[in-house]
Image: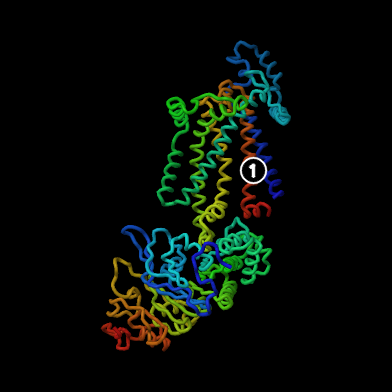
Amino acid sequence: MRGRGAPALPLAAPAPGEEVLRIDRLEVEFGRGPVRTTALRGVNLALDAGRVLGLAGESGCGKTTSALAAMGLLARGSVVRGSIRYRGTELLALPEKELRHYRGRHLAMIFQETTTALNPVIRVGDQLMMAARTHVPGGRAEVRERVIGALADVRLTDSERVMTSYPHELSGGMCQRIIIAMALSCGSRVLFADEPTTALDVSVQEEILELIRGLVTRRQLAVLMISHDLAVLADVCDDLAVMYRGEIVESGPAATVLERPAHPYTQVLLDCLPTLRGRRESLPELPPAAEDSGAPPGCRYRARCAWAVDACLAPPPLAPVLTGQPRMSRCWRSVTVLEHTAREGGEPDNPGPDGAPAASDNMSRD
Amino acid sequence: MGRIVLRRLATSIPTIIVSTILVFVLRYLLPGGPVQAMLGGGTGQYTPQQIAAIEARLGLNAPVLVQYWHWITGVLHGNLGTSYYSQQPVTTVIAPRVIPSLELIVGALVVSTIVGGGLGILAAVNRGRPAGRTIQLGTGLGLSIPDFWLAAVAAGVLGLTLNIFPAVGFTPISESLSGNLDTLILPVLVLSVVTGSFLARHVSSAMASALDSPYIKSAWAMGLPPRKIYLNCALRNAVAPVITFIPLAFTALVGGTVLVENIYAIPGLGTEIVSSVSNEDYPIVQAIVLLVGVLVVVLNLLADIALAFFDPRIRNAISE
């Protein structure tokens, strides 16, 4: 079904569980000259067909930047290093002209905006057709069939009405479905969903999440779900990665990470949720972020961390919390944190009078 | 769409009526009086009886409302009165002068829309790059050059020194098309510099804000080719500001033609209105002002209809 000027690619649908996208040691810098901002400092992520990976963290931590980098949509002048491989093709090595064929056809990204994500002066049908005809060969009628099929996939069965409508005549939830349908009709295998439900009502939010979950299973989509809202991520994700200031600080199966965080930052994010652990009367406040002057040595979270000890002056690696388990944490004291959260405590009992880490901390590995 | 046209048409009628009243009142606001203008010089050598007789003949002794009624019914029948100066019907005086002015205005509108619009698109697409900066600099220069200076310098340099175009003068289209175009090029270019620069700025900011919008971000994310993103997506959203701009540009160009026609000695409405004002030939002044006023209202009407045609949201807002 695909064709037209694209480089050779594995065209068959990926097998369930196949790793379709792999991001390795991704570094991104913005700005030019001496004023540079480091947005990502070596991020690793892997997306598998039929699975949803959640990406959590406060705003500015690099969640969206990671996805935009994979799409090749970062602002001009950004420096990107590392590797982003889509089913064997190194995307970072591709010139923009070729990368363009991957957008829509293989990788798609949807955003927080819903009604404004569609062009206000063009009929929805024309927009869907414009995108699909860019990527799908065949006659107008054939492509139209495909678009109608994609609309049905997102449970918009009244395709005639939808396609002749303008975006302002439709609801936010419908528009988000239409964008998803657009990605499907183009043939996307990977979906970066950047806060796709943040602008929607709670009930509609639920519908969209359910829809995405369904598509993941039925179409073997690989989804990166970006959200600041752990409750949303808890709903749909198989795996979860938590980012802090351009680094992944914890990753692993979503249920385990949310149940028993092994990084103090994940712990604090969870405590900020009003409902999930509904025992707090007032939400805790994160201590303000420290100024990032120069290159501060050690753990980036140190200044805000209730668990910080002297050892944190050395940068911790992202390492398995317990050997043989998929959980990773970027914390010298992850085992202690884990043991503590297992006992359902929020604050460290006793960080040690002299700040010395306990013997069980994983810094002993080094 | 039909209902929108009717509705807009209905709202333009009061505007036109008000503008005819303003045009009519103009005669009473100008210094001197019609009789004085007709008799030329002073009224000193005429007896009050003679002046009263002339006023009676012109209907000037009737109440103002009656005078307005006579005038407006005449206008509706195509009778714009008689020139005080040449004693010819106003339509006979004005008709041959409409074409050169329209040629100038339409020519300048076309040139500035195509060139200015194109530059505006290029400036927005190349934002932050040398090409975009150069265009912004150029249009900034175009906006700040006074048109009277530019007209004189263009006539001097391109016309006299380099002798590429005729420096001044005008060949009517009825005589020779190529001669007509030859004499039009310089004045049209002069008029287009300011209007085109203005339009380029306008288009580039409209286009830039369209390019920054979420739907363009989505279009990139769907892998649409840049050509489609710029021309099929963003440009459609930048059309509305261009449409609203055209009646404004027309008004500005009317002012521009007065100047340019006088510098290049083109026998259009601009030269006519200047001589009529100095001759205190009110019927001519009135007719020209009325003509321009009606044209502005009509252009605005057309712009509104075009806007509704291009933007479904406006269409909805009007028909609800």
- x then y, percent, for residue A21: 46, 73
Comparing A348 with A123, the one in front is A123
* Total tally of numbered discs in the picture: 1
Report the front residue among B56 and A76: A76
Residue drawn at 51 percent across, 41 percent down: B115
| A337 up-or-down from B280: above or below | below
Report whether residue A337 is seen. Answer: yes
Image position, residue A185 (x, y; %): 59, 67
For the residue pair A180 and A150, the one nearer the viewer reads as A150
Q: Residue at x 54, y 54 (%)?
A: B234
Above/below status of B169 relative to A253: above
- Assign the C terminus of chain A to one quadrant of the image: bottom left
Q: Residues within 10 Å of mark 1 (few under 14, many from 20)?
A: some
- In terms of depth relative to the viewer, which is nearer, A315 or A150? A150
Can you name the residue that lies furthest to the left here?
Answer: A354
Q: Quadrant of residue B252?
A: top right
Taking the image as drawn, is residue A274 in sight? no
Q: In which quarter of the image is residue B95?
A: top right
Q: Name the residue under label 1.
A: B302
